Amino acid sequence: MTEVTLHPADATAASRPPAPPGISRAAGARIDVIGVSQHAAERQILHDVSLSIEPGELVALAGGSGAGKTTLLEILAGLGAPSSGQVMHDGVRVDGAMHHPGVGYVPQDDIIHGEMPLRRTLQYAARLRLPDGTPPEQADRVVDDILRELDLADRRDVAVRMLSGGQRKRASIAVELLTRPGTFFLDEPTSGLDPSTSAEVVRLLRQLTRRGVTVVLTTHEPATIDECDQVVFLTRNGHLAFAGPPAQARRYFGVDDLVEVYHRLASEDTPRAWAERFAAWRQPVKAPARPVKAPARPVKAPARPVRPDDRPSPNVLRQWWLLTRRNAEVLVRNRLTLAILLGSPVLVTAMMAVLFQPGAFQGQGRADVGPAQIVFWVAFAGFFFGLTYGLLQIVGEQAIFRREHRSGLSAGAYVAAKIGVLVPVLAVVTAVLLGVLRALDRLPAAGWNVYSSLLVTLMAEALSALALGLLASATVSNAAQAALALPMLCFPQVLFAGAVVPVADMAAPGRWLSLGLANRFSFEALGRALRLDQFTGTLPAMRAYGGTFSGSVADRWLVLAAFAGVFALATVWVLRRRSRPGSRGRR
């Protein structure tokens, strides 16, 4: 396997890729952790952790599952604030209240789209993360330089999903290196990799430290720990059991193999006893860190921590445009998803053409409810299209959004970009649905004004359903849960829309429930546009619908637009909330 090669620390400045305007090449920070504890509900995840990490060190956070490694990592990175205590980067306190541009963070999940070629996905990441006003040519040069540094230049045109595990991990690291952070945090970077590939990733991180970058990672692997300058062992519930060089850890625990440390921490004494033992052991060696207001070491002006105001992200409108382009490209490149998005409307249209007799709107049968049934299922088709389009849009890329949001991406721009790409597709499929049903005489002959009203109604409903689907997609944790949400969201739209049982005949709870369903208002608006009220007086079977199709079509449009707005805003709120550190389970 090819070894990754970075420019050595003593290389000339000319040999290094130029930093985009507004980005300082910050040296690695000294990190001081002072009495950090973290609570989640009734559980305490971290207990009074104190340690120090020197600039340019490679540090491993180790311990069994549930020891709080990821929680501590996020707090160290400034992605979350501890319940008590503080974290200092070069003497400056950090917490989760702001974005820290000088910090790179790579979660365990991939933070790049698998459908696009590697260079293309990095280009989008660069345009979203580099300072506003960075010329496209400059951003492309940064991408190409990063690809060469990480030995990925020959894979630049390969789809990310086709890369090996180690190459995908390096690609995720490349996203964070675009902004040249001085301090780098990685959650389980070697998880799932074979020993050779794992060693390759660790070599890459070691070479970053030779440049002065401070690197902190979580790991379970003794081989990875041995390559680090320091190891921090956490025991259950986040008690600090040891912090120091790996060789010193062997002596302290009295073991030859670091695997035995895990066994001892899990089976001997209590977590508190381990923490007290280590505190007593290191007390004579190193006095506890004290909070400081000034930097703990001299920091040259070019190496100071970079503030968000120094390098603002692209504005919301530009973010929306970049995300819209990226979403469209991902959609086009994912042939299976594209086939489903285009194929399901074709299938639904074909089933409706087979299900209903032509000429139903002539209303010649005394027991005929065909017009109402056709209108209802046309309305439901619009809802179904929008819902299915939205359900899988977010759940599969939550890790990508979470990291981009923490780097300054607007959740509103993200949701608006999803809508911006899918609405034109919905417009095409709903227009085709109406055109095919009219050509097959399942809908009546009418003027352009009537069919324009039908199209607007279906688009308003599809938009509200799309926003509902995005909300569900942002709420669930995986694709299986999204699939289960589909029938749960569809059944009420069928039962309480007023077609199966007219609203006037429903029990009171059902009438109240129907007020919150888009399909009811779409059904009523479509029926009003097609003048179904004329059948309620001439066909006995239609009389039960009474005043269902009276009133204004525009009023129903306003209700559907309100549903879309509420669901879209709720999606933004959920995304922001779920992007906060502490919203997921910890390892």
Image (tube, rainbow, N blue to C red):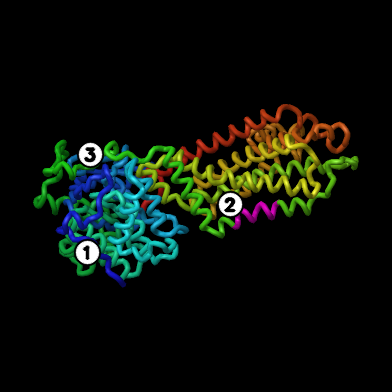
Residue 370 place in picture, x, y as percent: 82, 43
Q: Quadrant of the C terminus?
A: bottom left
CB contact under 8 Å: marks 2 and 3: no
In space, the residues marked 1 and 2 are separated at their CA atoms by 45 Å
Q: CA distance from mark 1 to mark 3?
A: 29 Å
Quarter occupied by residue 448: top right
* Image: 225 above or below 465: below
Identified at 23% across, 47% down, the residue is 49
Q: Which residue corresponds to mark 1?
A: 227
Q: Distance of mark 2 from mark 3, alpha carbons? A: 44 Å
Sort mark 1 into few (<14), some (14-19) or many (20+) by Cα contacts within 10 Å. some
Give the residue number, with chain letter if any, for mark 3: 93
Residue 484 is marked as 2
Q: Is residue 43 left or right of residue 31?
A: right
Mark 3, Cα crowd under 10 Å, few <14 / some 14-19 / many 20+, is some
Q: Which residues are magenta?
A: 339-348
Q: Secondary structure at mark 1?
A: loop
Residue type (three-letter) at the residue carrying disc 2? Leu
Residue 51 in view (yes/no): no
**Residue 505 percent coordinates (x, y):** 77, 34
Label for residue 174?
A: none
